[in-house]
Amino acid sequence: IVSPVVDATEAVKGEKATLLYKAELVRSEDGTVRIYYYDKDMKPLDLTKLDKSAKATLAFKKNKKWNKEEFALNQTEGAYVAKAPKSPSKPFNIDVVVKEGNKELLTAFDNLD
């Protein structure tokens, strides 16, 4: 699944936020997630520009309320990797925030199952 990467301060703009990069989410059956970052032309991004770790939030609805569970991802072999918590309901969302200098970059993977 490929999603746009935007400046976190522009998240309120939704689809009108300026596209900075693209991110790809790859999930394994054991719950491991890998996030790969690309430039606008889908060429792999040089991850030395980004922090070594990223923050992720798994969001899911339970009893008609949104619940969130945070987890950390770490740079490993050209991607950010972590074992994601199991969502008790579907669909669910995973939002990832990584820093590039002083700027926080946000990518949102919505309606996952």
Image (cartoon, rainbow, N blue to C red):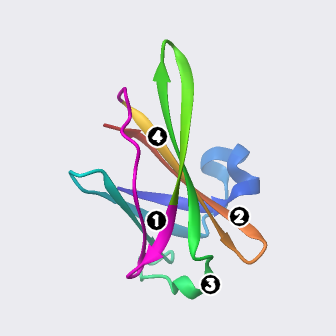
Rounded to the nearest angstrom, the CA distance separating label 2 from label 3 is 12 Å
Q: Which residue corresponds to mark 2?
A: 104
Hey, what amino acid is under mark 2? Glu
Hey, what amino acid is under mark 4? Asn
Q: Position of residue 59 (x, y in %)?
A: 51, 36
Rounded to the nearest angstrom, the CA distance separating label 1 from label 4 is 14 Å
Q: Which residue corresponds to mark 4?
A: 93
Q: Is residue 22 above or below residue 41?
A: above
Rounded to the nearest angstrom, the CA distance separating label 4 from label 2 is 19 Å
Report the mark closest to the observer, 1 or 4: 4
What residue lies at 56% left-to-right and 25% top-to-bottom?
Answer: 66
Q: Which residue corresponds to mark 1?
A: 23
What residue lies at 31% left-to-right and 37% top-to-bottom?
Answer: 113
Q: Earlier in the sequence, mark 4 or mark 3?
A: 3
The residues colored magenta run 73-90
Secondary structure at badge 1 equals strand
> Mark 3 Cα within 10 Å, few/some/many (few <14, many 20+)?
few
